[in-house]
Image: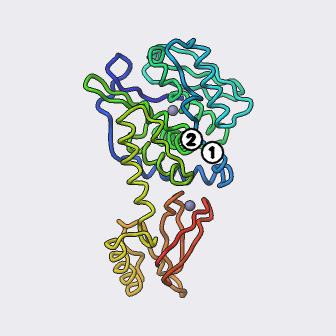
């Protein structure tokens, strides 16, 4: 199994400048939906508490192997993988880390030699690798390496260990480092969606100013998911556009514009219905077009106040 890339100028792998923005947003959202489908609402709720810094703290004077084993055990405990045992080793390699996905209960994780000198980031690398084991045991994967790595980063973050990956993102005049496949803003987005569901404030854990900035941006983006029509929290411009699209759908019996998140179902004899993504889990919700409607997402149980 492929690991993930480390950027930086110290001879590990330099994949060019750090990518920003939301190039993987559709896959990230599909990953959140897939997590709810596979785990159920109840299991997602058991991850209400994140890994906290003290759980994965790693001082430069701690023994490398004992420390790495201890952090791995913490992550195994966090993900509730009762009998899994991680054997951590270090070697020279291009990627940051990789894990051998065998039958278990022992799993061999290799970390890049770079982490010998960057021990505080070992928790971040292991958070991603142990999530590979978790998803492997669940039998949950996306086709293709890229999408599967995005699923892994998204699941790591949504289930409470991914803030470590975002915090490992640091830039200064001389070098940059980023772990994982999501951009910093995408990590911030998933972290913010988690924070909104669990009422958590992960920003207090950041040691990296760049990570904090990415989190703030991701939060703004995550809030926008809850402000799309037909949700009542939508802004004036969005509501006006929605009213126009709805009228058009009613008059011409068409689904509506392809560039909007909502679409109308004009087929059949019944009243017009509108479907749109749940702002929490992104499963599509369908409600009748008849003014104020309160719906509850069947997957993540979010109550949705709509003006259809
Ligand atoms: Zn990976
Ligand atoms: Zn939902």
Q: Is residue 175 left or right of residue 125?
A: left
Q: Position of residue 107 (x, y in %)?
A: 65, 24
For mark 2, give the secondary structure: loop
Residue 99 higher or lower than 131, as above or below: above
Mark carried by residue 47: 1
Q: Is residue 259 left or right of residue 27?
A: left
Task: Identify the image quadrant of the N terminus.
Answer: top right
Residue at horizontal 62%, vertical 64%? 298
Q: Is residue 99 left or right of residue 102?
A: left
- State the image quarter where residue 269 is shown: bottom right
Q: How many marks?
A: 2
Q: Which residue is mark 2?
A: 160
Residue 80 higher or lower than 260, as above or below: above
* Residue sitting farthest toward the right: 83
Viewer-proximal residue, 183 or 1? 183
For mark 1, give the secondary structure: loop
Viewer-proximal residue, 176 or 59? 59
Q: Position of residue 110 (x, y in %)?
A: 55, 20
Circle 2 crowding by C-alpha within 10 Å: few under 14, some 14–19, many from 20: many
Q: Position of residue 82 (x, y in %)?
A: 73, 33
Q: Position of residue 234 (x, y in %)?
A: 40, 69
Give the distance between the C-alpha atoms of the residues marked 2 and 1, in whole angstroms.
7 Å
Residue at horizontal 32%, vertical 29%? 171
* Residue sitting farthest toward the left: 173
Earlier-in-chain disc, 2 versus 1: 1
Q: Are marks 2 and 1 in contact (CB under 8 Å)?
A: yes
Residue at horizontal 48%, vertical 83%? 291
């Amino acid at each position: 199994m492929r690991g993930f890339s480390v950027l930086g100028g110290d001879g590990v792998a330099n994949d060019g400048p750090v990518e920003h923005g939301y190039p993987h947003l559709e896959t990230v959202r599909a990953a959140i939906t897939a997590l709810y489908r596979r785990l159920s609402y109840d299991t997602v709720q058991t991850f209400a508490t994140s890994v906290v810094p003290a759980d994965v703290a790693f001082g430069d004077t701690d023994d490398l192997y004992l420390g790495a084993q201890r952090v791995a055990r913490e992550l195994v405990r966090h993900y509730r993988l009762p009998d899994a045992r991680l054997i951590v080793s270090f070697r020279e390699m291009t990627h940051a880390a990789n894990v051998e996905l065998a039958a278990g209960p022992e799993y061999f994780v290799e970390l890049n030699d770079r982490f010998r000198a960057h021990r505080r980031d070992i928790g971040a690398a292991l958070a991603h690798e142990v999530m590979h084991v978790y998803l492997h045991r669940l039998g949950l994967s996306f086709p293709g390496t890229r999408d599967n790595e995005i699923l892994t980063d998204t699941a790591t973050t949504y289930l409470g260990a991914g803030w470590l990956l975002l915090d490992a993102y640091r830039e200064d005049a001389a070098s940059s480092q980023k772990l994982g496949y999501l951009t910093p803003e995408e990590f911030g987005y998933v972290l913010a969606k988690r924070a909104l569901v669990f009422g958590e404030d992960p920003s207090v854990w950041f040691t990296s100013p760049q990570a904090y900035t990415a989190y703030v941006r991701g939060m703004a983006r995550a809030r926008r998911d809850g402000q799309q029509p037909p949700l009542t929290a939508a802004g004036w411009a969005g509501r006006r556009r929605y009213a126009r699209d709805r009228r058009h759908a009613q008059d011409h019996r068409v689904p509506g514009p392809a560039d909007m998140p909502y679409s109308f179902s004009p087929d059949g004899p019944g009243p017009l219905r509108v479907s749109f993504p749940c702002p929490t889990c992104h499963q599509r919700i369908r409600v009748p077009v008849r003014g104020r409607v309160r719906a509850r997402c069947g997957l993540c149980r979010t109550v949705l106040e709509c003006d259809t």
